[in-house]
Amino acid sequence: MIQRIQSILLLGVSICMGMVLAFYIWSEVNPETSTGILFSPMEMKVIDMGEMPQDSSDDVITQTESTWYLAALAVAASLVALFSIFQFNNRLNQMKLGALNSLLMVSYLGVCFFKVNQFEEIVMPQVQGGFHLGFMLPAGALILNALANRFIRKDEKLVKSVDRIR
């Protein structure tokens, strides 16, 4: 039953977690030294912006660090949500997959927050960086996942009450 509300919510979770790969998680720019950090699910880049910070043609990447594990967590959460949609016959299994998905998304957000605190020290600790959609989409997906789990539980209670009446 793909048309159920929880299926639509789980599809939203999958789309949000898939879109995470296209956006930056966090960035910070030090105006004094014209250096900046771009943190995405695939890598962290420290960029020297040169004389003209507005012109990106003279940007030099001075340091990189691979963060592929964040992309793997996002893809795993997206795939678990998609798989969960097609488990509509087994609502208990669907609830377990929802709990696993919540764990994956909380892990993603926790690792992002940890890495942001770690990367903040590289450029300038006094300057605050800004969070982008790559950090906010998983938070939205977590809310959608919680709502989907609530509707799945509601369906399970309805089925049990109908079975009792028979």
Image (tube, rainbow, N blue to C red):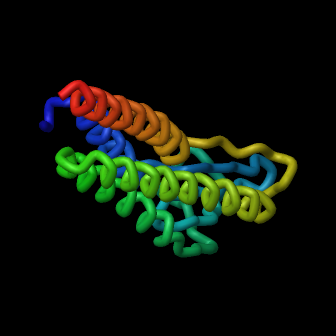
Q: Choose between 136 and 31: the one closer to the eye.
A: 136
Residue 156 can be seen in this image: yes
Measured along the vertical axis of the image, is residue 7 above or below residue 108?
Answer: above
| Total marks placed | 0
Asked which quadrant contains residue 148, the reply is: top left
Q: Does residue 138 appear left or right of residue 47 in this picture?
A: left
Q: Does residue 104 appear left or right of residue 161 in this picture?
A: right
Kindly give the residue lying farthest to the right in the view shown: 126
Asked which quadrant contains residue 37, the reply is: bottom right
Q: Residue at x 40, y 38 (%)?
A: 149
Q: Choose between 100 and 18: the one closer to the eye.
A: 100
Q: Choose between 100 and 54: the one closer to the eye.
A: 100
> At which x and y percent is residue 74?
42, 58
Q: Choose between 29 and 39: the one closer to the eye.
A: 39
Q: Does residue 137 appear left or right of residue 121 in this picture?
A: left
Measured along the vertical axis of the image, is residue 115 above or below residue 160?
Answer: below
> At which x and y percent is residue 122?
76, 65
Residue 35 can be seen in this image: no
Q: Residue at x 82, y 56 (%)?
A: 124
Quadrant location, the C terminus? top left
Q: Residue at x 48, y 58 (%)?
A: 104
Quadrant location, the N terminus? top left
> At which x and y percent is residue 72?
41, 68
> At which x and y percent is residue 126?
87, 48
Q: Residue at x 53, y 74 (%)?
A: 66
Measured along the vertical axis of the image, is residue 92 above or below residue 67?
Answer: above
